[in-house]
Amino acid sequence: MFDALSQKLSAALGQLRGRGVLTEEAIRGGLETVRRVLLEADVGFDVARDFTERVQARAIDLPALRTVAPGQQLVKLVHEELVRLLGEKPATIRFASVPPTVVFLVGLQGSGKTTTAVKLAKRLALEQKAPFLVAADVYRPAAVEQLVLLAGRAGVAVHAEPGETDVIALTRRGIEAAKRARARTVLVDTAGRLAIDTEMMAELGRLKAAVPPHEVLLVADGMTGQDAVRIATGFHDALGISGVVLTKMDGDARGGAALSIYWTTRAPIKYIGVGEGLEAIEPFRPERIAGRMLAMGDVLSLVEKAEQSLDRATAEKLARKATTKKGMNLEDFLEAMREMRKLGPLESLLTMLPGVSRDMLKAVKAADPKRLKHVEAIVLAMTPEERRRPEILNGSRRARIATGAGRPVQEVNRLLAQFREMGRFMRGVAGPGAMPRPGRGAV
């Protein structure tokens, strides 16, 4: 997410970061480079110009601090203005005092609206918001069937009436069904079009007037850059959207949409889609996203992701075994690897850590996830006894495992050497008495 933008911004600011003295000329030159980077990321011209002018006005009056280099102060200013550009504070769904809270999801076809409806419902279920889906896209072929299928996978109730064309009546009946089911949130998947047109906006306007929602969330494709901004402006002018969900932000999104939508419409980005899985949706937090853009990391989001994805009992068990004298065996190693894969690609996890270099990300991108699949194949090619007692793996056993996994023997040897080294490292880190008790710092 924002890989290209992050790399270019970091390079532009890197020239200024370590400077002991920043002249006005150096500030202007550095910020001109930043402005070009923003324009290349498909940020609107007016947005990029206003951003750099605000940073420059503040940077020229930077106080001289003994403990902080001027270049670092400038990076801090850029971070603060990025946060402001992205909306300053996290914006969430405003829940009604008397449930259910009705949320319309609107957008063009192809933006991922139906999938986003289910992703958002699944997230709201984890937050104890009792979601309920209404299939109100009566035009796109198989839209109703798609929503019902995905809702079934997510374990969320859905109201669907295949063949019904009266959207207003269908939505009203869906909300009544949600009330009977004691739902707290109703997500209405409305119909989209291939482009904004008068007929679509008129129908959405009639639906909004007849069934007033608490929220109207635009689902926009984050990879379309300024097109997403134009679409957001069109929907906002016609309907008055209350927020935006940007999808496909795990792909080659240049960041222009995220950096321009709020500044252009004042409609906050509330969620971002970060993958294909039904759990791959995150609340949009401007301060953390700005940190990622400047390669400052986002450790808090990484911790939250781990808390949501990993099984705590399994993690505690593996942590205890890793730091005992006996250590983990290859069965434990396989279990740990599968737990880590729940967090997503290793490359995206590393971008949440501060100080990770571009070269390191390139190396990980080249090795992951194919390398992890090869490791798993090697471990699965072993017998249960070999996984529990890797010390019995002699030359003939290793040759058999390599053949079974379809990998070279050298790769099997390298894995076993790395596994032994990891075991020694974990025991050395723990030391005598260093293992935390369950419930008191164990992770």
Image: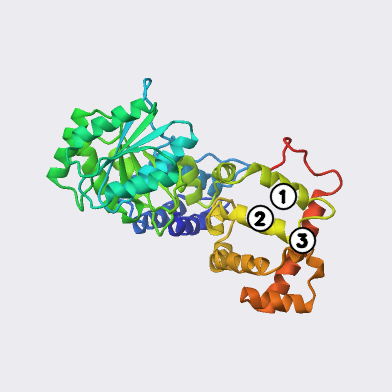
Tell me what residue is drawn at x 62 percent, y 68 percent: 377
Disc 2: which residue:
335
Tell me what residue is drawn at x 38 percent, y 56 percent: 254
Asked if 269 appears above or below 401 in the picture, the reply is: above
Few, some or many C-alpha atoms within 10 Å of disc 1 (few <14, some 14-19, many ≥20)? some
Is any part of residue 246 visible from this angle?
no
Percent position of residue 115, x then y: 36, 48
Tell me what residue is drawn at x 36 percent, y 20 percent: 98
Residue furthest top in the image: 98
Disc 1: which residue:
318
Q: Residue 388's mark?
A: 3
Q: Nearer the viewer, mark 3 or mark 2?
A: 3
Percent position of residue 142, x then y: 27, 52
Q: Which of marks 1 and 3 is in front?
A: 3
Quadrant of the drawing holding the N terminus: bottom left
Of mark 1 and mark 2, the one earlier in the sequence is: 1
| Front residue of 7 and 402 | 402
Q: How far apart are marks 1 and 2 (CA)?
A: 9 Å
Image quadrant in which you'd find residue 334: bottom right
| Front residue of 194 and 23 | 194
Few, some or many C-alpha atoms within 10 Å of disc 3 (few <14, some 14-19, many ≥20)? some
Is label 1 in contact with label 2 (beta carbons under 8 Å)? yes
Q: What residue type is labelled 1?
A: Leu
Q: Is mark 2 on a helix, strand or loop?
A: helix
Of mark 1 and mark 3, the one earlier in the sequence is: 1
Q: Which amino acid does label 2 sit on?
A: Glu
Residue furthest front in the image: 162
Of mark 3 and mark 2, the one earlier in the sequence is: 2
Tell me what residue is drawn at x 21 percent, y 36 percent: 239
